[in-house]
Image (cartoon, grey):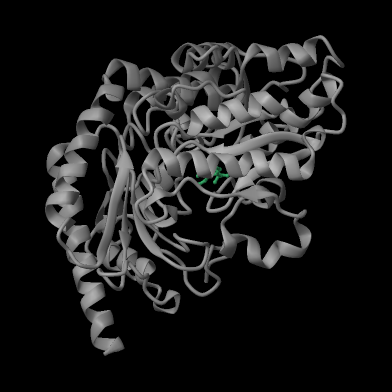
Amino acid sequence: MSNVFHRSALTTPPMATRALGQQITDVAGRSYLDASGGAAVSCIGHGDPRVVAAVSKQIAQLDYAHNGAFTSQPAEELATHICNAAGLGMTRVYFVGSGSEAVEAAIKMARQCQIERGQAGRHIVISRRQSYHGNTLGALARSGSETRRAPYAPMLPDRTQVMPCFYYRYAEPGETPEAFGRRAADTLEAEILRLGPENVAAFLVETVVGATSGAVTPVPGYFTRIREICDRYGVLLICDEVMCGVHRTGPFLACAAEGIAPDIVTLAKGLGGGYLPIGAVVCRPEVHDSFAQGSGTFTHGHTYMAHPVVCAAALAVQQVIVEDGLAARVVEQGAALEAALRGRLGQYPHVGDIRGRGLLWAVELVADPETSAPFDPKLGISARIGAEAKARGLLVYPGSGTIDGWQGDHVLLAPAYSIGTEDLEKIADVLATSIEVVTRRTADVVS
Ligand code: PLP
């Protein structure tokens, strides 16, 4: 019997014993090709000796010193690396332990920044439907992920959420991407006016949507309009790049591809690449200045933030990305993954959409190819495809509620930036077989 409180109270997952490169091996000796980096986390592959060496060195030299009393060399170097890589005028980094903590810190930073600027009434953080920002209560309150929210709904503040920028599902027939983007962005302006701009602190948005709808990229012009609206009403723009940042979709910050600079950005997964848990809130100088020229202190903090060993691990991961030219590989291998997916799955009737950017891709499934109607959620299609792929030695990230939080299924892929072309072809192949097997079985059951 296991004493671990696992995610499922009914089963204990297989025990992983080794991870190297693109493979994870379990105690029974079964090997799995890691096609999603867990939840889009592993970005340089597993078991890189350069990270192991950096962690060993740091832990021997300085394990822990409270962040209120001391800074550390790894934290300083990592913050400088992040600001240089991010560009867009970013100058300060607040280190935390996870993506959810980064979002919590970002929304509190935005709120306190407004107070420091003499705008104490501004306390509301608007977000979007079909988004995921984390499982802690503050982040969950802003998330649009319905199944994750449902049990806790009475504990969450009233939601203020606007339309997602999800062209495949939300565009009107004949609507151009540009017109759709304008319509989607304008729902933010309407919501700010409804709430009263003097009450709105920030808008929180995933630059590229990850887990909830599956690798949904914004349409051209959407973020330009969002930036204009935020500026017009004094609302801070927070881009949640916990999943899509750190080169996952190409540039270090995904928002660079949209031609805008947010006030605050959150990062996590690819920052530590899975070696040790880390998240970060990155901000522009004006945000930090408001604290420096105001109360002087951000009223927040955690025991383990800016942990020297964790920062050393993340710094080593970022150095591997630079040394091995992995940012350029994201673009090359992203194109190879797209080609493999379209080649293998493009004509398959139950595949409604193949979308993504860089090395963040999703395949959305449909029950009816004519109408794009989703499968009945009770069938649990994406979870079954995930299980089938795992049985065939492939780890993917299945998601449901793709369309509105309840309906729709997708499978997310986010392999390490170091993945080879043969492995990408294997991913497309095994995923295609898993989709074919599960949808055929389902058709047999349904008919
Ligand atoms: N924000 C986004 C965009 C995410 O994708 C996630 C996790 O998937 C989170 C926040 C929460 O991160 P964590 O699971 O590290 O708390």
Q: Is 62 left, or right, of 138 in this rendering? A: left
* Residue 423 shows in this picture: yes
Up-down relation of residue 415 to residue 376 (above or below): above
Q: Please tell me how many numbered marks the rendered image carries.
A: 0
**Percent position of residue 247, x then y:** 38, 28
In this view of the protein, which residue sits in the foreground, 391 or 154? 154
**Percent position of residue 231, x then y:** 65, 23
Residue drawn at (19%, 61%) of the image: 432
* Residue 265 shows in this picture: no
Quarter of the rendering occupied by the C terminus:
bottom left
**Percent position of residue 19, x then y:** 32, 44
Q: Quadrant of residue 257?
A: top left
Q: Residue furthest bottom?
A: 447
Residue drawn at (58%, 40%) of the image: 186
In this view of the protein, which residue sits in the foreground, 302 or 137? 137
**Percent position of residue 349, x then y:** 20, 67
Q: Is 15 left, or right, of 224 in this rendering? A: left
Q: Quadrant of residue 234?
A: top right
Up-down relation of residue 327 to residue 152 (above or below): above
Up-down relation of residue 352 to residue 226 (above or below): below
Dividing the image into four quarters, tell me where ligand 1 lies. Answer: top right
Residue drawn at (43%, 41%) of the image: 179
Q: Is 231 left, or right, of 117 in this rendering? A: left
